[in-house]
Image (cartoon, rainbow, N blue to C red):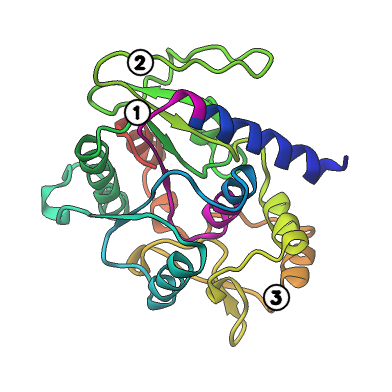
Amino acid sequence: MDDLDQLEAQSIYILREAYRNLKPLAMLWSLGKDSNVMLWLARKAFLGRVPFPVMHVDTGKKFPEMYRFRDEYVRKWGLDLLLGDCPPVEEIDPTLPPAARSAARKTAGLATMIEKYSLEGVIAGIRRDEQATRAKERVFSPRGSSHKWDVRNQPPEFWDQYATPHEEGVHIRVHPLLSWREIDIWRYIEREGIPLVDLYFSKNGLRYRSLGDQDITSPIESNASTVAEVIAELQTTRTSERAGRAMDHESEDAFERLRVAGYL
């Protein structure tokens, strides 16, 4: 087995453990590269059929290409899609910086969906290398009745044994990609031929390295127009993956405040 085989096997094991232990269970689908890899792994884990719903917490501000991609692959892959709306920004904590406040709409939208469908488990495509706060997460990460994350009180995870508490009002965030790096994601996309939104590839010297809402996401300068060229670029770049995310350039604690409150 090479390193990608090992990452794939670990993620499939995590997905199967989540499906065995947590019901009802759903997977977040943001339409970005990481969640598309996660969805691909779920199809592999369950013999080509995803046995739980996929959820898109929709801000209404995604790129048109992302909505077209979503609708196409819901049909092609026979997905059970759950759509949820987000509240207006005026209802969000006004003490947050502007971009973080806009992003926090998804926190409220997700909380509403979790309660609506009484979810015990939510699968999310975060990675430790993507952002410092996410590096503190567990693979199976409990959230209390208020959906908040207690970063200082997390269960130990020894020998791939994951805690699955079933207390009233508690749900588990499951992170099958936690050990992957950005370059691993792209190498796996290349190996497996995983479809992506074409905004990840250069047009007129610009491409998106991380996809979010149109008003808080910017492209980077790049001539990488194929998966192989993206991989080559990542082997030399010193720029952060989230350099194009506006909220990562606001106050130092903004992202951790979002995560603690239940952000994706």
In the picture of the structure, the residue carrying the numbered disc 3 is 224
In the picture of the structure, the residue carrying the numbered disc 1 is 120
Relative side of 181 to 176, left or right:
right
Tell which circle, 3 or 2, labels the residue nearer the N-terminal end.
Answer: 2
Name the image quarter holding the N terminus: top right
Q: Amino acid at mark 3?
A: Ala
Q: Quadrant of residue 27?
A: top left
SS at mark 2 in the image: loop
- The reply to whether residue 173 is in sight is yes
Q: Are marks 1 and 2 in contact (CB under 8 Å)?
A: yes
Residue 30, percent across and down?
43, 56
Q: Amino acid at mark 1?
A: Glu
Mark number displayed over residue 166: 2
| Eye-nearest disc, 3 or 2 | 2
Whether the magenta-drawn stretch holds residue 32 is answered as yes
SS at mark 3 in the image: loop
Residue lying furthest right: 1
User: Which of 193/184 is in front?
Assistant: 193
Relative side of 212 to 159, left or right:
left
Whether the magenta-drawn stretch holds residue 93 is answered as no
The magenta-colored residue range is 20-40
Q: Label 3 crowding class (10 Å Cα cut-off): few <14, some 14-19, many 20+?
A: many
Q: CA distance from mark 3 to mark 2?
A: 46 Å
Q: CA distance from mark 1 to mark 3?
A: 40 Å
Q: CA distance from mark 1 to mark 2?
A: 8 Å
Residue 16, percent across and down?
57, 32
Q: Amino acid at mark 2?
A: His
Name the image quarter holding the C terminus: top left
Q: Quadrant of residue 145?
A: top left
